[in-house]
Image (spheres, rainbow, N blue to C red):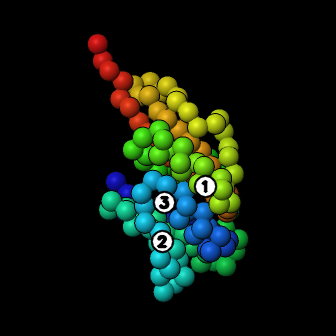
Amino acid sequence: MFSHVMLGANNIEKSKIFYDAALGAMGVKPSFIDPKGRAMYLHSGGILLLTKPIDGKEATAANGSTIGFAAKTPEEADAFHAAGLANGGTAIEDPPGWRENGAMRLYLSYLRDPSGNKICAMHRIPRQIG
């Protein structure tokens, strides 16, 4: 459904260190800096860009928004969380763990990045019917 996600970042290098570590723990290659100074991640057909806002104002986190990254296993979500914390992220919400959500069982791991964006690694297991 999505072609790309672009997040505002006040300090591209600091954000690059954070995302290189957190996403690297999930098998994503480190970003590269494009000619416009944006950090770009390319993985499984998806693109994540980190950029300073083009209006010249400070980047701010969107209240009520979350960017979710697919984790292959709960252990991968935990590695994402640990790497993010070790590289400038902040733990938020409940600690990483299982949550029940109607027809799904979810393993969720939430962080705020260095610019305050709310992100999550999620591993999903569909419920068995019957």
Q: Could you say whether the residue bearing mark 3 is in a helix, strand or loop?
A: helix
The mark found on residue 31 in the picture is: 2
- Around disc 1, counting alpha carbons within 10 Å, would you say few (fewer than 14), some (14 to 19), or many (20 or more)? many
**Which amino acid type corresponds to the residue marked 1 in the rendered image?**
Gly
**Which amino acid type corresponds to the residue marked 3 in the rendered image?**
Gly
Q: Residue at x 43, y 46 (%)?
A: 71
Residue at the far left: name it: 130
- The residues bearing labels 1 and 3 have C-alpha atoms spaced at a distance of 10 Å
The mark found on residue 84 in the picture is: 1
| Mark closer to the chain start, 1 or 3 | 3
Q: Residue at x 61, y 74 (%)?
A: 12
Measuring from the top left, give residue 120's x and y in whole percent: 54, 47
Q: Which residue bears the numbered disc 3?
A: 24
Measuring from the top left, give residue 74's x and y in whole percent: 47, 38
**Which amino acid type corresponds to the residue marked 2 in the rendered image?**
Ser
Q: Is residue 50 visible?
A: yes
Residue 43 higher or lower than 10, as above or below: above
